[in-house]
Amino acid sequence: MDQDYERRLLRQINHQNVPEACSPVTVKSGDRFIPTRAGSNWSINFHYANENCWSPNQNQRAKDASTDTGKDAVAYAALLRNELLGAGIETMPDPHTDDRRHTILMQDTHSLFRVTRLCDLSVDDDSVTSVCWNERGSLVAVGTHKGFVQIWDAAGGRKLTSLEGHSARIGALAWNGEQLSSGSRDRVILQRDVRTPPPVERRLQGHRQEVCGLKWSPDHQHLASGGNDNKLLVWNNSSLLPVQQYSDHLAAVKAIAWSPHQHGLLASGGGTADRCLRFWNTLTGQALQSSDTGSQVCNLAWSKHANELVSTHGYSQNQILVWKYPSLTQVAKLTGHSYRVLYLAVSPDGEAIVTGAGDETLRFWNVFSKTRCTKESKSVLNLFTRIR
């Protein structure tokens, strides 16, 4: 490369204040929720957010961790070549810094992670479009672009079965005990008991466009589904038609989360044209609070230990927000991703989250604490305290 051109390019990158390792090398096409994965290269960063420093007026942009350009880059590129990632998460705050708002953990990542190749669908000219662990963590379901659902024994590294039934890609999966629900671009939700060969199948049809979000309630009685038709539907175990339909969102509904603290409380988030967090009392069918987040809502997850939830966002701010419920006070704003934060998972202990974005980075954050108060709020905004 010409040295003068290289210097101009580096000046441009520095001027834009965009970390070079986190900037997509090329512009990749893809739809709103499942980007094109070809030619991608993942890197990893670790972040620690101290709750004592969380304030909307004090947050600052997290610095990018230095990443190993050798083995780690190769390992995480594997995820985008349709291989699945297995990793152990550890809380590792840096004790040598005064600013603990978004402390980046600079430890040796090789000691934290074990990366295992579970499957490679490229040999079948297919690709992974969704992944979901079962509740015991022994099985992982893999949805594919061609409409198949594969069930894998992660510990044994072997495929147990491959389920047909969908005619288009599968963008959403949700386990309910031994039953697995899958939502597809063909607008159908299939619910199957994976123990029976061939599996007993329930076919749920209610969305007019692609099903892009699925979540079962903690009591295993209701399934919430979101679609590109801007609808949020609630299903029970006995009917083939939705028992509730919510139409307040103005864009696709991918982000869905049931509260583990208040029975029947459902949260949902809308896409770019909507940007709102909305809360629903599914016991009465009543709409509760809503909040305009300012960005596309991609994912939602409740804390297991406190009445708080985390949301991840896309255009235009690509941030991660932590909210207190029911006041909807924003208690943390985490930045670092430079593109849509399309993927979110919570660690088994409920304290850490991992986020994946279109900037081809995986970032690990400590956002929830087991020691926080788990008592329900007695605020007048909490309508659930009045119906019990």
Image: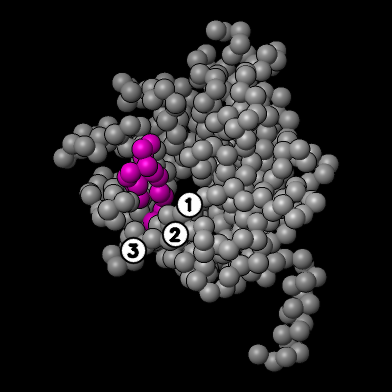
Return the mark for residue 114: 2
Other residues around mark 1 within 10 Å, as few (<14) / some (14–19) / many (≥20): few
Quadrant containing the C terminus in the rendered view: top right
Is residue 242 shown in magenta?
A: no
**Quick one: 303 or 14, which is closer to the camera?**
303
Could you tell me which secondary element the residue under label 3 belongs to?
loop
Closer to the camera: disc 3 or disc 1? Answer: 1
Q: Nearer the viewer, mark 2 or mark 3?
A: 2
* Residue name at image x 46 percent, y 43 percent: 212
Regarding residue 54, the answer to whether it shows in the image is yes
Q: Earlier in the sequence, mark 3 or mark 1?
A: 1
What's under tag 1, amino acid-wise? Gly
Looking at the image, can residue 315 be seen?
A: no
| CB within 8 Å, label 3 to label 1 | no
Is residue 19 placed above or below 176 in the rendered structure?
Answer: below
Query: Number of marks in the image?
Result: 3
Q: Is residue 265 above or below residue 160?
A: above
Q: CA distance from mark 2 to mark 3?
A: 18 Å
- Residue type, mark 2 in image: Arg
Quadrant of residue 371 within the rendered picture: top right
Q: In the rendered view, does 325 fall on the left or right side of 232?
A: right
- Going by the picture, which residue comes out furthest to the left? 197
Region in magenta: 125-142
Instruction: Name the residue carrying label 3.
Output: 120
Dot 1 corresponds to which residue? Answer: 88
Residue 246 horizontal/vertical position (percent): 53, 26
